Every structure is written in structure tokens, then in C-alpha cells.
Image: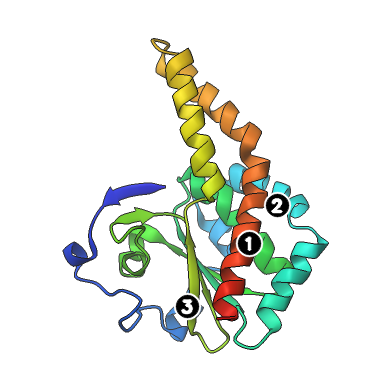
């Protein structure tokens, strides 16, 4: 989810071509997944629900692929997620990342965005949007490999279709009814979005590791 519109120059921060604020020592200070869940204030049930669905989404072939991408030369052994517990893209997406890390053996660390804006600054979407989750992969030596932001391309396409359909078919209806209809449409397509996320991540990491 994109919340604020800021440019890197407005924040005066780094980009990935400069020295990263995410040192190995800083990475190690991040929350592990269960520790993060234990301390959040909202949406614990949603995080659990989407973690449960992720168990079925990440199959044996995916597990093997992620392990291969982790264990090869310059492999992705560390993954960082920047997010907030109130954000739908985060409570839908972070549990899937947690499951991928669990089955592959990646070291996952989580940083709340709003208390780590210097980290968020390095991974702004299109150089200006504080979109979350931001998912960043590193080697064992903590060299940056690649990052993925917010949601898969399929979700963006589907959400545009859903919004257009709802605006056309539900014009004039109350906001609560419209919101419920949008949520139902999203929930119906979400399993495909999870699968698309897995595929995008495999392709992204593979390209970074094998470049």
C-alpha cells in the first residue's frame, strides 16, 4: 500500500547506489516473524489466516526452487520486510514471505516502516512512494540482491478491473456496501495473487543471483 508521496530528495536519504543504512548489524536487529506478530496491535487474525493459506500455496517444487536460490553461489539467504500491521497488502503479503523463508531456510527480519523511515527511503516505489510491504533480499555476506514492492502485477491488473466494475455497477450505493463488495472480489482472486507473488519472487531472485 502506498501511503505518502515523497521524493528521495525531499527526505535527504540514501538510495541503493549509496551506502545502505541496512548494515548487517542493523538487519540482525529486526523482528523475527513470530516476534513481530506477538507485538502487533491489530489484524493478528488476518496475518494468521493468510499464513495458513500460504502453507498450501508454496508447494514442494517452490520449496526446492527457493532452496536452490538460497544455497547457490551468491544466493539469497537473508530477506527483510518493511511493513505496518494495519496495511492490507502487508497482512496479506508478509505471511507468504514468512512461509517462503521458513521452508527455504532464509533468515527473515521485519522492520515497522513508520519507525524506520530511513530504511523505507532506500526502497521507495518509483522513487517517491512509501509502498509496503517492501521485501529485500541479501546474500549471506549481506550484499543487496533485489527487492520487490507491494503486490504482484496480476493484483494491480485485477484491482483496476474490480474498481472499474464496482464503480459502474454500484454507483450511488453506500460506502460500506461498496467496501464489502470490493473486499469479496479481492478475496476471491487472492489465491491467484499468492501464486503470482511466488512466481515473481522466484524470477526476481533468480535474475539477481545469476546475473
Dot 2 alpha-carbon crowd within 10 angstroms: few under 14, some 14 to 19, many 20 or more: many
The label number, if any, that marks residue 98 in the structure image: 1
What is the distance, in whole Å, between disc 3 and disc 1 at their CAs?
16 Å
Circles 3 and 1, Cβ within 8 Å, touching? The answer is no
Give the percent coordinates (x, y) of residue 177: 49, 17
Q: Is residue 176 above or below residue 30?
A: above
Could you tell me which residue is drawn at 45 percent across and 85 percent down?
Answer: 25
Dot 3 alpha-carbon crowd within 10 angstroms: few under 14, some 14 to 19, many 20 or more: some
Q: Which residue is mark 2?
A: 54
Q: Earlier in the sequence, mark 2 or mark 1?
A: 2
Dot 1 alpha-carbon crowd within 10 angstroms: few under 14, some 14 to 19, many 20 or more: many
What is the distance, in whole Å, between disc 2 and disc 1 at their CAs?
9 Å
Residue 113 horizontal side relative to residue 54, left or right = left
Circle 2 or circle 3, nearest the eye: 2
Element type at mark 3: helix
Toward which corner of the image does residue 97 lie, by quadrant?
bottom right
Q: Which residue is mark 3?
A: 27
Give the percent coordinates (x, y) of residue 174: 41, 13
Residue 104 horizontal side relative to residue 139, left or right = right
Q: How is the image coloured?
A: rainbow
Image quarter hosting the C terminus: bottom right
Task: State whether residue 34 appears in this view.
Answer: no
Could you tell me which residue is drawn at 50 percent across and 79 percent down?
Answer: 28
Q: Is residue 32 above or below residue 7?
A: below
Q: Earlier in the sequence, mark 2 or mark 3?
A: 3
Residue 209 horizontal side relative to residue 117, left or right = right
Element type at mark 1: helix
Circles 2 and 1, Cβ within 8 Å, touching? The answer is yes
Amino acid at each position: 500500500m502506498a501511503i505518502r508521496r515523497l521524493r528521495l530528495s525531499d527526505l535527504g536519504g540514501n538510495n541503493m547506489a549509496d551506502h545502505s543504512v541496512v548494515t548487517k548489524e542493523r538487519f540482525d536487529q529486526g523482528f523475527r516473524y513470530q516476534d513481530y506478530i506477538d507485538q502487533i496491535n491489530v489484524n493478528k487474525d488476518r496475518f494468521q489466516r493468510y499464513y495458513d493459506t500460504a502453507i498450501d500455496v508454496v508447494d514442494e517444487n517452490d520449496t526446492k526452487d527457493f532452496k536452490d536460490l538460497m544455497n547457490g553461489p551468491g544466493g539469497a539467504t537473508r530477506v527483510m520486510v518493511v511493513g505496518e500491521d494495519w496495511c492490507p497488502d502487508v497482512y496479506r503479503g508478509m505471511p507468504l514471505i514468512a512461509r517462503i523463508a521458513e521452508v527455504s531456510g532464509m533468515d527473515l527480519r521485519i522492520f515497522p516502516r513508520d519507525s524506520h523511515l530511513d530504511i523505507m527511503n532506500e526502497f521507495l516505489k518509483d522513487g517517491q512512494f512509501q509502498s509496503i510491504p517492501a521485501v529485500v533480499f541479501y546474500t549471506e555476506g549481506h550484499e543487496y540482491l533485489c527487492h520487490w514492492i507491494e503486490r504482484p502485477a496480476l493484483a494491480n491488473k485485477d484491482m483496476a478491473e474490480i474498481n472499474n466494475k464496482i464503480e459502474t455497477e454500484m454507483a450511488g450505493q453506500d460506502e460500506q456496501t461498496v467496501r464489502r463488495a470490493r473486499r469479496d472480489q479481492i478475496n476471491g482472486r487472492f489465491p491467484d495473487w499468492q501464486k503470482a507473488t511466488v512466481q515473481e519472487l522466484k524470477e526476481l531472485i533468480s535474475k539477481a543471483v545469476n546475473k
